[in-house]
Amino acid sequence: MAHDIFPITEVEAERVRKKCLSDAASVIPDLYTSEINFEVSTFFDGGYTWRLGDSFNGHPAEGEAATWLEVVEALRAAACEHFPDSVFASQYVRATGGGS
């Protein structure tokens, strides 16, 4: 089985989970600070719908996600792609040089 090749301890899994949550907690206020507008909505058990931008200037990206972490990652990637010269993108573009 693939997971037996690179075993991960419960401690390491918890560290990774906390890091993901910490990053997710930063993305939303950093988008706001960079004046990059976005919308997130949900209805009952239908997951989340997210849109980058606003009704006045348009929505250059939008999508659906099953979890909040997926929403945050999608917003991060879309903001880096559509606003590559923003302060936000300079903070969040992956070290590999891509926004996704």
Image (cartoon, rainbow, N blue to C red):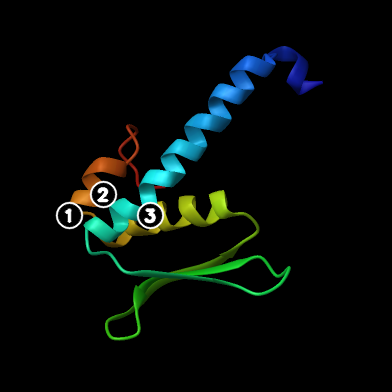
Circle 3: element type:
helix
Q: Nearer the viewer, residue 29 or 80?
A: 29
Q: Position of residue 72 (x, y in %)?
A: 47, 53
CA separation in Å, label 2 and label 3? 13 Å
Q: Residue furthest bottom?
A: 56
Determine crowd level at label 2: few under 14, some 14-19, many 20+ residues with C-alpha closer than 10 A: many
Residue for badge 2: 89
Three-letter code, disc 2: Ala
Does the CB distance between marks 1 and 2 fall below 8 Å? Answer: yes
In the image, what residue occupies the spot 42% across and 39% down?
Answer: 23
Circle 1: element type:
loop
Three-letter code, disc 1: Asp
Q: Nearer the viewer, residue 72 or 99?
A: 72
In this rendering, the label closer to the viewer, 2 or 3: 3
In the image, what residue occupies the spot 42% across and 58% down?
Answer: 75
Q: Is residue 79 above or below residue 5?
A: below
Residue for badge 3: 28
Q: Which mark is residue 85?
A: 1
* Quadrant of residue 67 within the rendered picture: bottom right
* Quadrant of residue 84 within the rendered picture: bottom left
Q: Is residue 55 above or below residue 77?
A: below
Three-letter code, disc 3: Ile
| Screen quadrant of the N terminus | top right
Residue 80 in view of the camera? no
CA separation in Å, label 1 and label 2? 7 Å
CA separation in Å, label 1 and label 3? 18 Å
